[in-house]
Amino acid sequence: MDFLSIIKNWGLYAITDEQLSNGKSHAEIARSAIEGGADVIQLRDKVASSRKLYEAALEIRWITKKANVIFIVNDRLDIGLAVDADGIHLGQKDLPAPVVRQLIGKNKILGVSSETVEQAVQAEKDGADYLGVGPVLKPAQLKPDAGEPMGLLLLKQIRQKCRLPIIAIGGINHINARK
C-alpha cells in the first residue's frame, strides 16, 4: 500500500512516553493528544514489561480506531503485530528495516529514526515510509537516549537527499513549532 498520500496529510504526530508525562498513562496521553488534534499516536516506552506495554497498546489501539487516528508502536514489532497497530517505528539500534518490512508487509506503515543524511538515505532504500528526524531542538526535558539537538539545517539536508515524509522530533513545543 502507498502510504505517501496518508503520511503527507499528517499534521501532529504525538508520542506517548510515561517517563515524560508527569504521571499520565499512555492512554491518557493518547486521548489528550487526539482531543488536541493529533493525526498519529506513537506508543513509546523503553522501560515497561512486555505485558504492561501490550496492555497499553491494546487500550491505545481501541482509542485510535474509535477516533480514526493512525497508531504506531515504537521499537516493538512483537507488540505492534499483537495489537494490529497501523505501523512500527524503528530506531537505529532496533531490528533492521528490511526485516521488519518483510514481517509487516506492504499494508503497514514503517518509520525509521534518522540522525544523519546517510541514515535517512539508507532508510529510504530499506523500505521506510517516513523518517523521524531529531532531536531537532533542545528538549526542555531530555530523554535519556536522545542525542544532541541537530537543528533545522539537518532537516533541509535530508530533504535534499530523500523524498520520504519527515517527522521532526525532539524539543518541539507550542512556542517553536512554526520553525
Image (cartoon, rainbow, N blue to C red):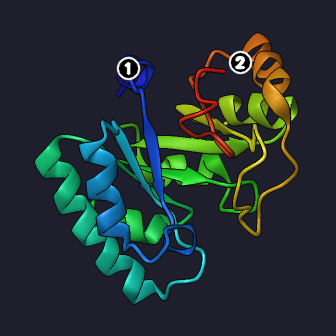
Res 52 → quadrant:
bottom left
Q: Position of residue 115 (x, y in %)?
A: 81, 41
Residue positioned 53% across, 72% down in the render: 45
Res 161 → quadrant:
top right
**Which one is in front, 26 or 76?**
26
Is residue 127 in view? Answer: no
Helix, strand or loop status at disc 1: loop
Q: Report the side of 142 relative to 100 (left or right).
A: right
Q: Report the side of 128 relative to 140 (left or right).
A: left
Give the CA distance from mark 2 to mark 1.
18 Å
Task: Please tell me which of labels 2 and 1 falls first in the chain.
Answer: 1
Residue positioned 38% across, 88% down in the render: 51
**Which one is in front, 23 or 104?**
23
**In the rendered image, which residue does mark 2 sit on?**
162
Residue positioned 63% across, 44% down in the render: 112
Instruction: Judge whether 95 appears above or below 157 on screen.
Output: below
Instruction: Judge whether 144 appears above or below 132 on screen.
Output: below
The amino acid pointed to by label 2 is: Cys
Q: Position of residue 65 (x, y in %)?
A: 16, 50
Is mark 2 in CB contact (under 8 Å) with mark 1? no
Q: Position of residue 103 (x, y in %)?
A: 46, 55
**In the rendered image, which residue does mark 1 sit on?**
9
Q: Which residue is farthest left? A: 66
Res 152 → quadrant:
top right
Q: Where is residue 166 in the image (x, y as percent from the top left)?
A: 61, 27
Is residue 142 in view? Answer: yes
The amino acid pointed to by label 1 is: Asn
Instruction: Judge whether 65 appears above or below 159 on screen.
Output: below
Residue positioned 75% across, 32% down in the render: 120
